[in-house]
Amino acid sequence: MTPEPIPVLFVSHGAPTLPLEPDVPAHRFLAGLGNRFQNIAAVLCISAHWNTTRPAVNSIQKPPTIHDFSGFPSELYRIRYPAEGNPGLARRIAGLVEAAGLPCDTDTARGLDHGAWVPLMLIFPEAGIPVIQLSIQDHLDPARHLALGAAIASLRHEGVLIIGSGGAVHPLGDPVLALGEGIPTDSRAALFSEWLNRAVTSGDTESLLRYRDLAPSAIHAQPYPDHFMPLLTALGAAGPGAKGTILHESWYWGNLGMAAYEFR
């Protein structure tokens, strides 16, 4: 047991090319983030890119690197993040989720998708810390993802760094907020980001659960909520009354918000 619970992180992982772009502010931020976390026993990553009907953990000793994207430079597909898994810890995580009254499946084949390895290869480039993933669910229900995080909160006392990996502003597919190199950040994306920062730093859990109704331009900033659910799971894992601290803010491709938060 650690004397103090480890903070919970939410990071925006951006495009798969982020590890290849050292001049991007979010790359530089993530590359220095690991210095904040010493003597970590394992990482549990809740990625926007593993979406299942029921909660699931991957229980595999050597998780492969999944290149779950297309149309990017060939060098990206040669990247491997060779972190070990930890099947014993994966089974414990599944037990915690089930003890909270939620079903939890164990996947013995799934590797690490880019929502996990893109930020982790910058945060922990030596890949010396075991990594387990926990899925989001395709119902995309905010309250149930908050509850999923609450189920695993005790891991913070056991040397496990819990990281939600998604996108603070993620308008992929939205017809209004365009993405592309050189595109200026739209005021609607900025308004959503400002609202999110206020809700996170004030610990306004109820507003975060109702972000679709309360946040300005939520339908454009998060048209498909998969990249928001890891934030809610991270918040739940930090415990009742948790508040967030802004660790990083920047924009990528115009309207992709790259904020990162630490919850305590």
Image: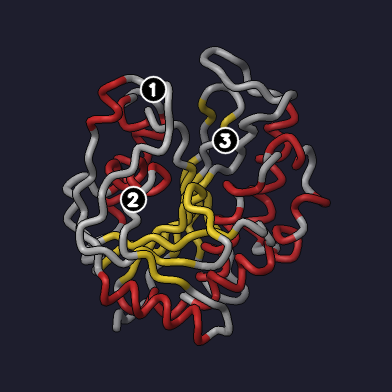
| Residue at 68% from the left image edge and 32% from the top image edge | 190
| Residue at 53% from the left image edge and 58% from the top image edge | 52
What is the quadrant of residue 122 in the picture? top left
Q: Is residue 182 above or below residue 88?
A: above
Q: CA distance from mark 3 to mark 1?
A: 20 Å
Q: How was the colour assigned to the protein in this rendering?
A: secondary structure
Rendered image: mark on residue 42: none
Under tag 3, what secondary structure? Answer: strand
Which of pointers 1 and 2 lies earlier in the amino acid sequence? Answer: 1
Q: CA distance from mark 3 to mark 2?
A: 23 Å
Q: Which residue is mark 2?
A: 112
The image shows residue 186 at horizontal and vertical percentages of 69, 23
| Residue at 61% from the left image edge and 31% from the top image edge | 172
> Tag 2: residue type?
Leu
How many residues crowd around disc 3 within 10 Å: few (fewer than 14), some, or many (20 or more)? many
Contact, CB < 8 Å: mark 1 with mark 2? no
The image shows residue 205 at horizontal and vertical percentages of 69, 65
Q: Which residue is mark 1?
A: 72
> Tag 3: residue type?
Gly
Q: CA distance from mark 1 to mark 2?
A: 18 Å
How many residues crowd around disc 1 within 10 Å: few (fewer than 14), some, or many (20 or more)? few
> Tag 1: residue type?
Phe
Q: Which residue is mark 3?
A: 257
Q: Is residue 183 above or below residue 138?
A: above
How many residues crowd around disc 2 within 10 Å: few (fewer than 14), some, or many (20 or more)? many
Which of pointers 3 and 2 lies earlier in the amino acid sequence? Answer: 2
Q: Is residue 217 left or right of residue 58?
A: right
Q: Is residue 175 left or right of residue 146?
A: right
